[in-house]
Image (cartoon, grey):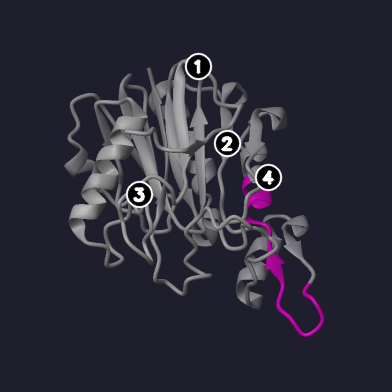
Amino acid sequence: MTPLPLLASPAIGVPFHHGFTTRAGGVSAPPFDSLNLGGKWGDPPENVRENRRRLLQATRARAVHFASQVHGAEVALVRGADDPSATAGRRADAVCSDVPDLAVAVLVADCVPAVLVDPRTGAFAAVHAGWRGTVAGVLGATVAAMASAFGARPHDLRAALGPAIGACCFEVGPEVSAAFAALGAEVVLDARPGGKPHVDLRRAQRLQLERAGLDPAAIDVLDACTRCDPENRFFSYRRDQGRTGQHVAFVTRR
């Protein structure tokens, strides 16, 4: 079988293995074509199971742990004896571990997928950060959880922010723009004449990671926009009005 096409960041080096999936490499039919990894949008379950089997193979891990994402700032810790089905029942938007050969992952379709690793302790995390999670501080909560659970020091961490809806396409209303302006005025772009403000999610998250203590040089951003990518490589909840699939960001340590 041809390996899944994965996007990756040079910021995340060995012994970690990570990836951001695209639409390519799966078995799902339109509008979920083809590597839909989300199970709640109407894609036949057997297709999702096969796609997830391919994902597991791509992670090179013995198991992949997802949580039940709720657009908040809770962090789920995964230990070596934990069962993935138990993790799936936990309400959290970040999953972290320090166990070799276990992968942690999040599902996205416009929200930002983030991967954090600590070369010193071996800890790693995957984070789902939409606008609500960003305002709630999910990335800062993840850094704090890695420090508390694994002894990670923020300045040792490395982070990658994956494909997501860009500032070019993320038009928001006044309440959302006000919430982001409170995080940092530079993340809200002026509205076009007669239009609404636009928010730069990944800029806001970069600022949060820097404020949490990460070295700015250790934060990488993959600039692809899921909504308007010219090659249509990504699922997009906004573009497809909710009738779409989901990508995955995963990370593990070999």
Disc 1 or 3, which lies upstream in sequence? 1
Q: Residue furthest front?
A: 1
Q: Nearer the viewer, mark 2 or mark 3?
A: 2
Numbered disc 3: secondary structure: loop
Crowd class of label 2 (few under 14; some 14 to 19; many from 20; radius 10 Å): many
**Span of residues in magenta:** 191-205
Q: Which residue is mark 3?
A: 92
What is the quadrant of residue 127 in the picture?
top left
Residue 85 shown left or right of residue 170 in the figure: left
Q: Which residue is mark 1?
A: 14
In terms of depth relative to the viewer, which is nearer, 88 or 183?
A: 88
- Find the distance from the CA under tag 4 to the CA under tag 1: 26 Å
Q: Identify the amino acid type marked 4.
A: Leu
Which of marks 2 and 4 precedes in the sequence?
A: 2
Label 4 sits on residue: 207
Position of the N terminus, as image quadrant, is top left
Rendered position, 203 above or below 105: below
- Determine contact: label 3, label 4, CB under 8 Å: no
Amino acid type of disc 2?
A: Ala
